[in-house]
Amino acid sequence: MEQQLNTARGDFRIALSGEASLPALLLSNSLGTTLEMWKPQVDELSKNFHVIRYDTRGHGGSPITAGPYEFKDLGEDVLAIMDALEVDRGMFCGLSMGGHTGLWLAIHAAERFQAIAVCNSAARIGTVDGWRERAAYLRQGGVSGMHDLAKSAPSRWFTDQFIAGSPDIVKQMQQGLENVSPEGYAACCDALATSDLRGDLPAINTPMLFLAGLSDPVTTLLDAQQMQCLVSTSQLKTIAASHLSNIEAPHEFTNIVSSFLSQQKFSN
């Protein structure tokens, strides 16, 4: 069920699946996508969880406020969504930017989460200059800049084999990126430029899953290994895919995340 949810931090586009009596699971999208990116996971996850998908600020039907954003903003948005839905404590799974949001939540709002899955992400994603250059390019180029970005996205998102074998899915993802607000995207680039959570990782004591794509050029296996070494309550799993691993290898991704979350559901 899709709806606009009124929260203390604005109206967010969300979609709810699964019985409300089940443990709550929030799914957080990657940069340049919307809650539709989780379609391959919804049916299976909603058997055991009350799945809450949402468009991150700057994306889709959620607030497109002027930047720069910080991950404090994106993390507090999650908490506001939980509050509006009267979810005191839940689970969280995010990919790339969404995974970094999960790290922020594990550091700053651990009491609200039973377990967090951080997928295809890192405690420091990219470089300050790289993100600032991309943000400036999109603010200047607007919609045209988003079209240019979409043309180059597949090589960052997927393996060559997947691009060749699943052109319709790749095209659909590119079209979704083209429709993202240039300012919203740029403001999230600002957040990525300034966020470095590496020094905070040893303080995390929430059960964590780090899931890495073996062919991911954006957030690498080494990034995941370094996080796993610093978080004593974490485990590391790998998947034969690139950056958007939940789309390239949906069954494997869903099985790994579902298994991890189900274990935590009964253990604490």
Image: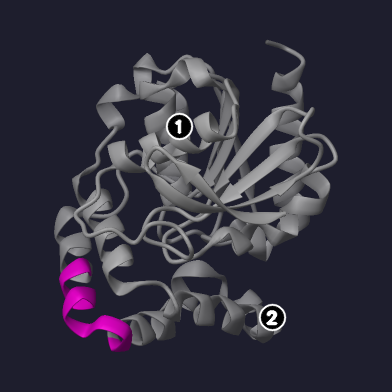
Q: Nearer the viewer, mark 2 or mark 1?
A: 1
**Residue 43 in picture, x, y percent from top left:** 81, 52
Residue type at mark 2?
Answer: Ser
In the rendered structure, the answer to whether residue 75 lies left or right of residue 245 reads left
Asked if the residues shown at circle 2 and circle 1 are in contact, with their CB atoms under 8 angstroms apart, the answer is: no
**Outermost residue, top direction?**
268
Please provide the residue range marked out in magenta. 135-144
Secondary element at image label 1: helix
Report the amino acid beneath label 1: Leu
Q: In this view, does 144 lie above or below 132?
A: below
Q: Is residue 113 above or below residue 149?
A: above
Name the residue that disc number 2 marks: 166
Q: Mark 1 points at which residue?
A: 79
Quadrant position of residue 114: top right
- Furthest residue in direction right, as rendered: 47
Quarter location, residue 190: bottom left
Q: In this view, does 249 lie above or below 75?
A: below
Q: Which of the image's four quarters has the N terminus?
A: bottom right
**Mark 2 or mark 1, which has the lower sequence index?**
1
| Residue 61 % position (x, y) | 48, 63
Check residue 184 in the rendering and tell me which mark sits there, or answer none. Answer: none
Please, what secondary structure does the residue beneath circle 2 have? loop
Q: From the viewer's perspective, is residue 38 above or below residue 174?
A: above
Q: Nearer the viewer, residue 104 or 1?
A: 1
Q: Visible in this render: residue 223? A: no
Residue at coordinates 38% horizontally, 57% vertically from top-left?
Answer: 63
Judge from the rendering whether residue 77 lies leftward or rightward of residue 130; answer left or right. right
Q: Neighbour class for label 1 at 10 Å: few (<14), some, many (≥20)?
A: many
Residue in view at x 51 percent, y 20 percent: 112
